Amino acid sequence: MKTEPNSGSLMGATVSGFELAGASDADLAELKASLYRHRLLVLKEQHLEPKEFVALGRALGTIEVYYEPMYHHPEHPEIFVSGTKPGDSTEGVPQTGKFWHADYSFMSNPFGITMTYPQIVPKTNRGTFYIDMAKVFAELPDRLKDRLRGTLVEHSPRRYFKIRPTDVYRPIHEVQAEIEQVTPPVFHPTVFTHPVTGEEILYVSEAASFGFVEPDGTRLPPEILQEVLERSGQLDTGFTDPHIHLQSFTEGDLLLWDNRALVHRALHNPRPEPAQSYRVTVHDDFPFFGVAG
């Protein structure tokens, strides 16, 4: 197995020669160490059946099955299916992830590793955008750093919740009430220490964050969240902000990333084009949150 940092890019590394079937415990430990070091890995020449993709997830930790069944692979619920095959509307959900987010930030126990395995690679506009939120926090002015440390940030899926087939003809207030019941808002540390790298992570996303709260429940002015999102690059609709990294991929690539440190956003073609990816999400060996400062 060989790992080479991506030359001239903000983050990431390319891994060649990795084969799950022959991987030792040392190989898997090296893979995870590289993931935390580089944030984002692209494993080349992967040709895995769905059950093998699930096995890779289990080799890296404990898989978290997505809570909404409509995203599940029909034979392997551990796999989240994004996009659909031409002529097949029974597997997958199209146009997922068109917003900045960290996976499962709106749940009480987020996971550390996300893996995506493209199955149908579009001919144009393929890739995923990423922002390193440790780097963003390190570059904030001291007045903002001091203001955010020790606060909590509200997370909820309500802003971008996708309507399900079972929601057709339901009154919208019933759907909204169900969202609040099944996934009520959670409050996570705005800034926490990465348990492996020791860096301070700013845990904020355009999709799921709804404002900062002091430990006593006092809400901070909404302008603070607006400023943080602008400084991070998440409000840049042209995707030219220097914090934004676009990772492209091709057939046979498998992407792993540090779901603690990165927010991401899918790149979709404005014109319909076949595309489908499998995703497996994994709790690693460390507690998700540390204590900042």
Image (spheres, helix red, strand yellow):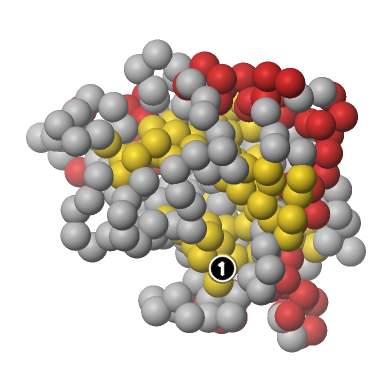
Residue at the spot 23% in from the left edge and 63% down from the top edge: 270
Residue at the spot 84% in from the left edge and 24% down from the top edge: 25
Location of the C terminus (image quadrant): bottom right
Task: Give the residue furthest to the left.
Answer: 169
Q: Position of residue 97 (x, y in %)?
A: 40, 51
Query: In front: 103, or 208?
Result: 103
Q: Identify the image quadrant of residue 93.
A: top left
Residue at the spot 72% in from the left edge and 81% down from the top edge: 140
Image height of 210 relative to 139, above or below: above
* Left or right: 16, with 83 as reference point: right
Q: Position of residue 11 (x, y in %)?
A: 67, 64
Query: In front: 23, or 165?
Result: 23
Res 59 visible: yes
Q: Position of residue 171 (x, y in %)?
A: 16, 39
Image height of 128 relative to 85, above or below: below
Res 222 visible: no
Query: In front: 162, or 61?
Result: 61
Q: Identify the image quadrant of residue 72.
A: top left
Tally of numbered tags: 1
* Left or right: 239, with 23 as reference point: left
Q: Amino acid type of disc 1?
A: His
Q: Identify the image quadrant of residue 26.
A: top right
Q: Position of residue 1 (x, y in %)?
A: 76, 39
Q: Which residue is mark 1?
A: 245
* Left or right: 230, with 61 as reference point: left
Residue at the spot 82% in from the left edge and 44% down from the top edge: 33
Give the crowd class for mark 1: few <14, some 14-19, many >=20 residues within 10 Å.
some
* Left or right: 80, with 1 as reference point: left
Label 1 SS: strand
